[in-house]
Amino acid sequence: MDGEGDGLRAYHGKRDFGRTKEPAGPGTSGEGAASGDGGQPRFVVQIHDASTLHFDFRLQVADVLKSWSVPKGPSADPRDKRLAVPTEDHPLEYEEFEGVIPAGEYGGGTVIVWDRGTYEPLSHDRRGRPVDFAESLAHGHARFRLHGAKLRGEYALTRFRGGPDGGGEDAAWLLVKTAGGGRGHGTPDPRRARSARTGRTLARVAAEDGRG
């Protein structure tokens, strides 16, 4: 994936933290890292009204959030195969980020936290033995169970284009629900969706946080 092995170097290189309120993070030391409930890793789905309106899907892997841009958003319907384009790793603190990225900055636009929670890695080898989650991503296929306020059940990320490290300009994955958790809330209208943190819509965040 983009930035894999570089910690947050790509993330830092794209941002001027004197202008954007996005978290800089603790670097790659892991200091200050958030932890999931009961030790489970975290996930977050943010709606990002940038040059194109999209969802950002992020999974905690070690001390970073592995990230994908999902144009149509995660779906609770197993028949839907959602394109997921890998982006740079983000700091764990980004799970809490909601606000307006200034125009002219990378990703300029409004961000809300649509859903968040914990996940269980489910990847196994052919003998049924658990596989390290980072290793399963490196191999191009990872299964996991989401425990969110809106997204629940088993999902899989599968690489269908890109190099062995999952990176490159043409890298692309599919995000698909595989089982469990019912049909959930489905993918919302992003313009009407409300934040899982504050209950605000994109328009309200833009009005309230875009003044500064």
Image: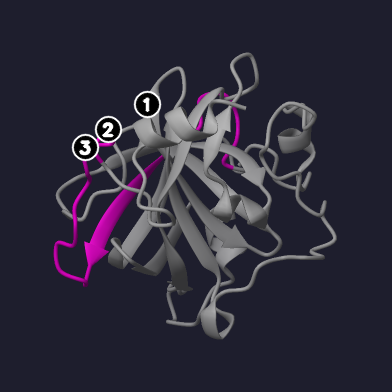
Magenta span: 166-192
Q: What residue type is labelled 2?
A: Arg
CA distance for labels 3 and 2: 6 Å
Q: Which residue position is annotated with label 3?
A: 189
Queried whether the magenta region covers residue 188, the answer comes back as yes
Q: Which residue position is annotated with label 2?
A: 191
Question: Closest to the observer: 105 or 198?
Answer: 198
Point out the image quarter for the C terminus.
Answer: top right
> Circle 2 — which element?
loop
Q: Which residue is drawn at 40% across and 64% down?
A: 143
Question: Closest to the observer: 12 or 133?
Answer: 12
- Is 53 located above or below residue 126 in the figure? above
Total marks shown come to: 3
Query: Mark number for residue 1?
Result: none
Give residue 152's position: percent from left, percent from top: 29, 67
Q: Which residue position is annotated with label 1?
A: 53
